[in-house]
Image (cartoon, helix red, strand yellow):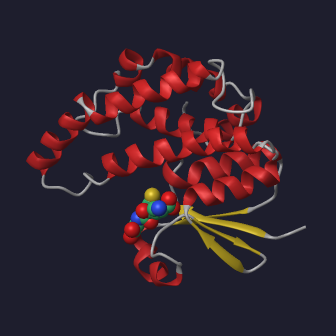
Amino acid sequence: MSKLRLVYFDIDGARGEAARLAMVIGGVPFEDDRVKFADWEARKPGTPFGALPVLEVDGQTVAQSNGINRYVGKLSGLYPDDAWQAALCDEAMDAIEEIATTVWSTMFLPAAEKKAQREGLAAGPLSDSLDRLQRRLVAHGGHYFADGRLTVADLKVFVWTRHLRSGQLDHIPVDLPDRIAPRLVEHHERVKEHPAIRAYYGKRNVAL
Ligand SMILES: N[C@@H](CCC(=O)N[C@@H](CS)C(=O)NCC(=O)O)C(=O)O
C-alpha cells in the first residue's frame, strides 16, 4: 500500500480538511503532517506552488486541494465512478473554492477595508453563492451533492458551512447560511452526524 502524507496547517478546517476527513472515513492510513504557522516560511519553498495542502504519495508530491480531494476520494470510496456524477462532485468543490478564495483574500486587509469588503461579500456574492449551492443540492435530491451518497464534495461543503457558522470570520454574519440556505445547514447536520466524523472530532476535542 502507498505511503501517504498530507501536509497542511495545524487547523481543523479550511483547504486541507476535506482530504483528512475522506481518508479518516475511508480508513486510508496517512500521516497528518500539521505545519505550525511559525514553521511555514521555512517549508514554503519546498512546496510546488508555495502553498498548502500538498499530498505526498510514496515520496512524490502533488498540490492543489481539489485535485487532492479527488485523489483521496478515489482511495476512500468517496468519489463517484460515473463520469457525470464525478462532474457534479467537482462542480460543488470548485464552487466552494471560488467563493472561499474570494472571502479569504480579505484576510490581511486593513481593518476598515476588510469590514467594508466582507460586508459587501456577505450581502452580495457570498449570499448568492450559498443560494446557488442550495439550489444545486436540492436539484440533486436534497441530501448529497452527487451520486446520491456522501462524496468528497459533501465534505468540502461541510467544512465551509461550518466555517461560515463558526464566528471566525469577522463581519460575516454567523447566521448567514441559516437565513439564506437552510437546506445547506440541514446538509451540514447530516454530514456532521456521520459516525466517523463524530468520532474523529471527538478524539480531536473539536466541538461541532
Ligand atoms: N489553489 C490552491 C490554494 C492553496 C492556498 O492558497 N493555500 C493557503 C492555505 S489555505 C496557503 O498555503 N497560504 C499560505 C501562503 O500562501 O503562503 C489549493 O486549492 O490548494
As drawn, 65 above or below 208: below
Give the residue displayed 49% in from the left and 23% down from the top. Answer: 134
Visible residue check, residue 165: no
Visible residue check, residue 70: yes
Give the residue displayed 29% in from the left and 54% down from the top. Answer: 105
Judged left or right of residue 13, residue 67 is right
> Residue 184, position in %: x, y?
51, 23
As drawn, 44 above or below 51: below
Give the residue displayed 56% in from the left and 58% down from the top. Answer: 65
Q: Residue furthest front?
A: 84
> Residue 18, position in %: x, y?
61, 47
Judged left or right of residue 104, residue 48 is right
Q: Quadrant of residue 163?
A: top left
> Residue 75, position in %: x, y?
81, 54
Judged left or right of residue 24, residue 61 is left
Ligand 1 shown in quarter: bottom left
Location of the C terminus (image quadrant): top right
Location of the N terminus (image quadrant): bottom right
Judging depth in this view, the residue of 9 and 203 nearest the camera is 9
Judging depth in this view, the residue of 121 and 160 nearest the camera is 121
Judged left or right of residue 5, residue 178 is left
As drawn, 26 above or below 16: above
Give the residue displayed 66% in from the left and 18% down from the top. Answer: 141
Q: Quadrant of residue 207?
A: top right
Q: Quadrant of residue 87?
A: top right
